[in-house]
Amino acid sequence: MVRGKILKYTADGNGIVFVDGKQIDFSLTQHWRSPVAPKVGDVVDVELNQDEQMSNLTVVDETTIAKEQAKKIAGQLSALGKEHGGAIINKIGMSTLIALAILFIGWMFFNTINVQVSQNYKTGASFYEVLKLINNNGDLSGLGNIQNSSAGIYGFFAWIALLLPIASHFHPSKYLKLSYCAPFIYSLLIAIIIYFSIKSGLSKATDLTSSFIGKSVEMEKMMKEMMDMTLRAMSFGIGFYISIAASIYLFYVGIKKFLVSNSSI
């Protein structure tokens, strides 16, 4: 059994899976063994027969992948701790490192938002991919074309937000304790930017239409309905829940550390 990724899937039940550096055609009726239809980007278990030919494809759910990634990073942190005599873990704390690792996984590997483009097609983006979209002044329709884009200054600040909680362990300033709050605050800021980006895009479309047919109460009502439809088409992915849980935990720890440092003065 090896892992692969769905690169292409069409309505006629045929698609392409990428596995072991190769692109292999598959058929829904011949190879697919999951109760849900394949989607582009799905991670799958690929079963090979004795002739090393693909026989079965089974989708791997995001929860399983999250557990595997967390286990892998925990193992790496454990190895790092052993290699350096546990100095890093003792200085920063295992709970903080695990929370940051989970946050990293949630931001980088799993969809923060899903968008129902049509009845039969759904796409999504991780938090870091959303940053790429914002940096390139794109709207939600550009989700499928951001793999090779840069997150720019937004990506830079994301890395800063990830590393700031560690900084408080290397400087005595009590105010650095609040750096634990950075990931949550940054996530909230990006959510606000996304909301107003969508609203601005719809407003521009409405203004363009109004320039031809004039403004009216019906036009304002239509804009509100379009905004509601856009928001309804969006849903949170597992990446959102993973990262928001980790960032809230870090926020709580930061506030607690800051209050304790104040009371000890």
Image (cartoon, helix red, strand yellow):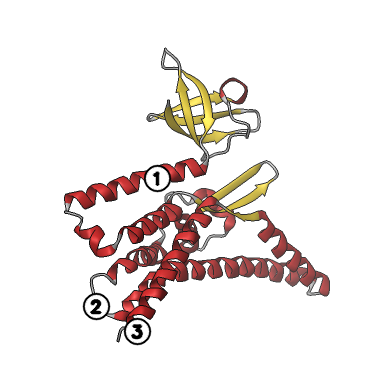
Q: Residue at x 43, y 32 (%)?
A: 3
Residue bearing mark 2: 172
Residue 25 visible in the picture: yes
Nearest the viewer among 194 and 253 is 253
Name of the residue lying farthest toward the front: 264
Please tell me the numbered disc located at residue 252: none
Name of the residue lying farthest toward the top: 51
Quarter containing the C terminus: bottom left
| Horizontal relation, residue 12 to residue 221: left or right | left
Q: Residue at x 41, y 52 (%)?
A: 105
Q: CA distance from mark 2 to mark 1?
A: 33 Å
**x%, y% of residue 157?**
38, 67
Q: CA distance from mark 3 to mark 2?
A: 13 Å
| Horizontal relation, residue 221 to residue 127: left or right | right
Going by the numbered disc 1, the residue's amino acid type is Gln
For residue 92, above or below residue 239: below
Going by the numbered disc 2, the residue's amino acid type is Pro
Residue 149 visible in the picture: no
Nearest the viewer among 21 and 112 is 112
Residue bearing mark 3: 262
Hey, which quadrant is residue 13 in on the image?
top right
Q: Earlier in the sequence, mark 1 or mark 3?
A: 1
Q: Earlier in the sequence, mark 3 or mark 2?
A: 2
Q: CA distance from mark 1 to mark 3?
A: 37 Å
Residue bearing mark 1: 69
For residue 61, above or below residue 217: above
Give SS at disc 2.
Answer: loop
Name of the residue lying farthest toward the bottom: 265
